[in-house]
Amino acid sequence: MYTKKNRFVPRFVALGLAGALLLAGCASSSGGTAGSDSPSSRGAAGFVGARDTGERIDGGVLTFGSYSFPSSLDPTRTQAAGSTGGTEMAAIYDTLVRSDSTSGSFAPQLAKALSNNSDFTSYTVTLADGLTFSDGSPLDAEAVKWSIERFVAGKGDVSQTWLNIVDRIETPDATTVEFVLERPWRQFPALLSLGPGMIVARSSDAETGAGEKAFTPIGAGPFTLAKFAPHEELVLAARTDYQGGKPPLDTLRFVPTSGAQSQYESLKSGQIDMTYILRDEAVIKQALDDGYSGYLSPTGQNGIGTINNRAGKPGADVRIRQAIAYGVDPAAINTRANNGLGTASSELVPQTSRWFNNTAGIPFDHVKAKALLDQAKSDGYDGKLRYLTSSEPSQQATALTVQASLNAIGFDVTIDYATDVTDLVRRVYKEHDFDMTRGGAPVGEEAPYLNVYNSMASDSKNNPSGFADPEMDALITAVQTAPSDDAVREAISKVQEYANVTVPYVIWGPASVLIAWDGTVHGVERNITDIMFFDEVWMSSK
């Protein structure tokens, strides 16, 4: 059984700590290593910079530069990932469970304790006595069950995964919640670390005069909503009655940002204290070289070419998807978009991952790509392809590289610009208004099944490509039920082999995420998908 940590106990963590996740240095698909100055070469996922939390100071305002600023704080409508509003929502709701960066496992967060049976088909969450939401209502077992059932009914981002694995929720008493599974899953607590584990109060769904419901963010996390102006700012105030005592910070403020370079410039100028820098290896290198602390995640599949597989789109023809995969060299993407600082590979998981299995991805072969495209053209395809991108420099560089590579073998690629990241996410995930775009489907170290399922499974609500194949579904389920780490690696290998034929999307390599903060910020903790916790964060004077 895992029990909740004691809060405000100083922790001293070595530089570059990654616990069970600290693995070998990056290498490219051709066998060459990443450049010695690349972020990836500094180590696998883990904290970088000094982490001596010292003696905390109460008070202060921390300003965080969001990557994709949330338009809603309802976990059923906003994906619980660090890049898309998960950090913001976790500050309000907490999560029942969190991933533990020092062990690679899971531990209680909002919950008091977490345990499981011997065959990983039943998990029990124990709540503290007297736990309450910020409105004073009790957070008991029935409240947890109600909130999760609301999340699933609302079709939140991992709701289908939940439906596929959870048989029932039992509440034998006010402080005990038991999750009975359909089949074994050793990493099931990952779901309790994401949207389902963000427990909202019943009072969040208030009836309006018209008989409809209006959502109000009411949770049991360390902060409460003070102001929410979409596209402008989100301001949260510390709870004096938080279960572990008032957080050190008085105020937590989130603001939208526009691109890695501007994020870093805002951090350096003091406009923000912390930010989320995604997939720009040059900016990440600059931040690390300049001595900023943070959490670095060089994650597999974080640089992919998402191809719309849906009927009526070019990508509905597997030959076109194969032509794209063979026709774009990951090394060219790395050179143009990352100044050669990243790693070029076409594998589901990179060599830095604990799940690496030596199964190769699709190699660059422009001759084969042209032959496949010619076959599709002989059946009436006109070669036109619309590539959606944002105006962020590394995204533009990727778009131009893809355009040049594919045009060289006979495609006719046009580039379509989204107004910002939020617009791009909406067009890809909600409206499916694209032929191809650059995205990410990182295979997380904590629970690799989750993102393999999310990005490829037929019934996934978070599958932007629309790829659907029953044989792939069976292979993905085998990743979930694998009884050991070696079995997980073997199952992922089989997924890789089948993906090389069916090409749900193309893989250009791992890409780094750096959640960076300045020297005044202390006590940050990370959850799965790079959600950050602020319940113990405090700030020293500048």
Image (cartoon, grey):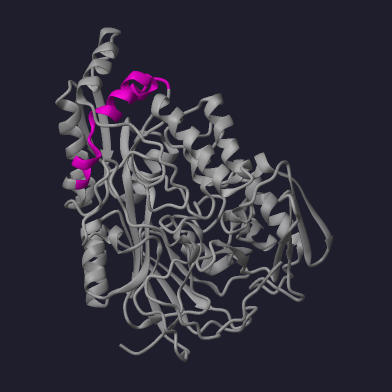
Observer-nearest of 403 and 4: 4
Q: Left or right: where does residue 479 sit relative to residue 312?
A: right
Q: Where does the magenta region start and end?
A: 311-334
Most extreme residue toward the right is: 172
Q: Is residue 309 visible?
A: no
Identify the residue at image location x=37%, y=47%. 350
Q: Residue 234's quadrant in the figure?
A: bottom left
Q: Position of residue 193 (x, y in %)?
A: 58, 59
Q: Is the N terminus in the top left, top right, bottom left or bottom right quadrant?
A: bottom right
Q: How many marks?
A: 0
Observer-nearest of 527 and 538: 527
Q: Left or right: where does residue 521 sit relative to residue 29?
A: right
Q: Residue 18's quadrant in the figure?
A: bottom left
Q: Position of residue 461 (x, y in %)?
A: 53, 38
Q: Is the C terminus in the top left, top right, bottom left or bottom right quadrant?
A: bottom left
Q: Position of residue 417 (x, y in %)?
A: 24, 41
Taken as a whole, is the magenta stretch helix, strand or loop?
Answer: helix
- Judge whether 34 appears above or below 42 on screen: above
319 magenta-colored: yes
Q: Position of residue 492 (x, y in %)?
A: 50, 39
Identify the residue at image location x=27%, y=49%. 343
- Judge whether 508 appears above or below 187 on screen: above
Q: Is residue 189 visible?
A: yes
- Judge whether 447 appears above or below 66 on screen: above
Identify the residue at image location x=38%, y=20%. 318
7 magenta-colored: no
